[in-house]
């Protein structure tokens, strides 16, 4: 899948098949061997001459199939005498590609979806694939997905691991769980943070309108929400804005960074929260950005350069271990920890198939990072702990354990983007128009 020559239109599906093959998502859903967005982006980068319509088709095919694996395999099982787990994996992926086109988009004529899919099938399986797809067309209205609010039924309808559905039901109830799962299919526009060193929301809005984008401008003058249009605007490429989901922006707002402060971001890559803090500081003071993987730090440095931010310094280190040189020297600390990601399933469909038990060791890591981060704060300094998951064992429970071991820290109320957190903790849900996100704000009292 490399080279500068773009494939013909009828080979876009072949590219999708290769990408899905590399991901190797098992029948019925399960851990994958790759991430769809990374593999698609790599292919598109290596094929710059691919027409816009074909680029969109490839992205839609791969992401669409990835987020419907459990549902698609349920339908295959209903139509086939051979269960999905017994099928050749290329044949299984071709059926997934064909059924997704037939069942979840009206932009591709059924005959084209069938013919193009069958044309990619090895000769020994063409009859089988053709029969399954045409059977689906005939029986489409008669194929019923499981009804009801059980974890198993929700798992099939919304293509999310049954164990995670059960966990969500326990936490949020069946009705709210279904609302959250449905929200993961919603196509929201892109959120931007305005680079207030170079422009403001009013000026940027005029620029975006001139480029043909639609969007919303919430109060505050720092963000553009739900941007829709072709590609990313020139403002992002040229450093007058950067991509940041509104939920993550609110966590940065809760930090309350100001000019002249010293700010530490302990798990900084790819850097959006650090950039937001630097803008709130009007590029005055210092932001120290740490990450365990030194190979990622150039992303922060190049991003800061593009935005015109000159107060960022990067450090490669393990943030689960206290750094003596940092002790008691920072006014603010951003502690956005590694997490299970169950609040961003809409953006990362592979997370749908990850069982909660696979993340059971994360709370200990999260607590160790929070403990180490706290040592860097000055008295009266503020630390913001955040995740992009919805599970309390990674959110409220970690904060509670931290506070029980650190009586010199207390939660403090905050308001961000019109959202109130009177107890110092805020959980944003995916069915509220943002990523699922948790933020806690704590102050060191002495």
Image (spheres, helix red, strand yellow):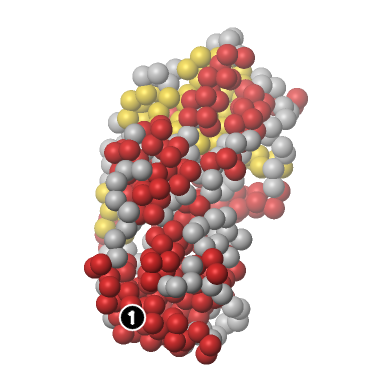
Q: Relative to the observer, which residue lies in front, 412 or 12?
A: 12
Position of the C terminus by quadrant: top right
Q: In the rendered view, tell whether residue 446 sits above or below residue 31.
A: above
Q: Relative to the observer, which residue lies in front, 120 or 214?
A: 120
Label 1 crowd bin: few (<14), some (14–19), many (20+), radius 10 Å: some
In this view, which residue lies farthest toward the front?
Answer: 81
SS state under label 1: helix
In this view, which residue lies farthest toward the bottom?
Answer: 123
- In this rendering, would 192 be left or right of 392? left
Quarter of the image for residue 380 reads top right
**Residue shown at the point (57%, 59%) measured from the top left:** 32
Residue that carries the numbered disc 1 in the rendered image = 134
- In this rendering, would 312 be left or right of 393? right
Report whether residue 133 is seen.
yes
**Residue shown at the point (50%, 57%) measured from the top left:** 29
- In this rendering, would 251 be left or right of 429? right
Q: Relative to the observer, which residue lies in front, 241 or 265?
A: 265
Q: x, y percentage for residue 401?
A: 57, 19
Q: Relative to the observer, which residue lies in front, 291 or 434?
A: 434
Q: x, y percentage for residue 50?
A: 46, 80
In this view, which residue lies farthest toward the left?
Answer: 141
Q: In the rendered view, tell whether residue 425 sits above or below residue 145.
A: above
Position of the N terminus by quadrant: bottom right
**Residue shown at the point (56%, 16%) measured from the top left:** 403
Disc tally is 1
**Residue shown at the point (52%, 24%) measured from the top left:** 397
Quarter of the image for residue 223 reads top left
Report whether residue 243 is seen.
no
Q: x, y percentage for residue 260?
A: 54, 28
Q: x, y percentage for residue 442?
A: 51, 20
């Amino acid at each position: 899948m490399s080279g500068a020559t773009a494939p013909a239109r009828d080979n876009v599906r072949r590219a999708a098949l290769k990408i899905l093959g590399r991901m190797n998502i098992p029948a019925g859903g399960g851990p994958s061997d790759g991430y769809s967005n990374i593999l698609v982006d790599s292919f598109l980068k290596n094929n710059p001459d691919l027409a816009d319509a074909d680029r969109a088709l490839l992205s839609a095919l791969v992401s669409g199939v990835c987020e419907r694996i459990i549902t698609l395999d349920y339908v295959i099982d209903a139509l086939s005498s051979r269960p999905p787990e017994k099928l050749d994996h290329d044949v299984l992926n071709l059926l997934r590609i064909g059924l997704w086109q037939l069942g979840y988009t009206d932009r591709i004529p059924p005959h084209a979806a069938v013919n193009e899919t069958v044309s990619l099938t090895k000769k020994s399986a063409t009859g089988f694939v053709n029969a399954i797809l045409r059977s689906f067309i005939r029986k489409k209205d008669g194929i019923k997905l499981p009804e009801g609010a059980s974890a198993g039924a929700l798992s099939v309808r919304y293509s999310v691991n049954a164990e995670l559905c059960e966990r969500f039901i326990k936490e949020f109830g069946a009705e709210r769980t279904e609302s959250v799962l449905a929200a993961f299919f919603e196509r929201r526009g892109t959120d931007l943070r305005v680079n207030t060193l170079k422009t403001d929301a009013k000026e940027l809005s005029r620029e975006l309108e001139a480029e043909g984008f639609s969007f919303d401008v919430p109060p505050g003058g720092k963000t553009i929400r739900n941007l829709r249009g072709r590609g990313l605007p020139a403002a992002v490429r040229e450093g007058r804005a950067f991509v940041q989901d509104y939920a993550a922006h609110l966590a940065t707002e809760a930090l309350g960074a100001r000019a002249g402060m010293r700010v530490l971001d302990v798990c900084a890559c790819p850097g959006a929260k650090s950039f937001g803090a630097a803008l709130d500081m009007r590029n005055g003071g210092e932001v120290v950005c740490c990450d365990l993987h030194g190979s990622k730090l150039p992303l922060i440095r190049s991003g800061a350069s593009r935005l015109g931010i000159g107060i960022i310094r990067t450090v490669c280190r393990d943030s689960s271990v206290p750094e003596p040189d940092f002790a008691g020297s920072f006014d603010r600390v951003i502690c956005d920890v590694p997490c299970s990601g169950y609040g961003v399933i809409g953006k990362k469909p592979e997370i749908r198939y990850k069982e909660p038990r696979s993340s059971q060791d994360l709370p200990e890591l999260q607590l160790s990072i929070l403990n180490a981060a706290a040592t860097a704060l000055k008295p009266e300094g503020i630390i913001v702990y955040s995740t992009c998951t919805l599970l309390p064992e990674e959110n409220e429970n970690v904060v509670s354990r931290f506070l029980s071991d650190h009586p010199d820290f207390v939660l403090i109320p905050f308001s961000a983007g019109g959202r109130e957190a009177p107890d110092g903790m805020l959980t944003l849900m995916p069915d509220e128009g943002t990523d699922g996100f948790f933020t806690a704000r704590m102050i060191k009292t002495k």
